[in-house]
Image (cartoon, rainbow, N blue to C red):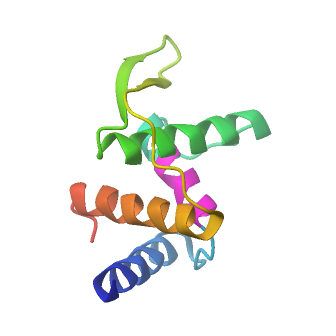
Amino acid sequence: MLEEIENWGKIQSFVEDFSGKRPESVDVILFLIGVQELGQGVKNFSKEQKQDLMHIAVCKIFSLGGFYELTHTDEEGWPHYKSIEKVPHRKMLLQEGLIKEYIVKYFEHNDLI
C-alpha cells in the first residue's frame, strides 16, 4: 500500500514536470494517457473527444490486467477496445483506488516511473 501511494506521488510529479500543474484527480491523468495512446499529439479536442480519450485510457490501463483488448485502430487513428472480462465493481473510493493501481501499472509498463 505504501509503495502504491509513493508511486502515485511519482506519477503526479511526472505529470507536473510535463504540464507545469500538479494533477489532483485521476481524470487529468486518464486524459493524458488517452492523448498518449491516440498518438496525435496535443491539440484542441472537443468535449466528446475528451471523453473518448478518457475512455481509451481506461481501456488501455485495464488491458494490462486482461480486462480489455485492442481490436483495431480506425481510419482516423483512434484505438478501439473490446471487453474481455468485467472489471471488478467496487464502491466509488475503492474503484478510484483500482484505477490508480492500473495507472501506476501503465506508467511502470512504459518505464515512466
Say which residue appears at 40% left-offset and 41% top-offset. Answer: 60
Quadrant containing the N terminus in the rendered view: bottom left
Position of residue 87 measured from the top left corner of the image (x, y, whole percent): 45, 44
* In the rendered image, the vertical position of residue 70 relative to residue 20, given as above or below: above
Q: Is residue 39 visible?
A: no
The magenta segment is: 26-34
Query: Which quadrant of the structure image shows residue 37?
Result: top left
Q: Which residue lies at the image location 62% right of the left edge and 59% below the top edge?
A: 27
Q: Quadrant of the C terminus?
A: bottom left
Residue shown at the point (34%, 78%) measured from the top left:
4
Decide if residue 84 is on the left or right side of residue 98: left
38 within the magenta span:
no
Question: Residue 56: percent from the left, percent from the top?
Answer: 51, 37
Magenta-colored segment: predominant secondary structure? helix
Left or right: 91, with 113 as reference point: right
Residue 105 as seen in the image, left or right of residue 15:
left
Question: Residue 19 or 95: which is nearer the viewer?
Answer: 95
Q: Is residue 106 left or right of residue 99?
A: left
111 or 103: nearer the viewer: 103
Membership of 32 in magenta stretch: yes
Q: From where the camera sits, is residue 50 visible? A: yes
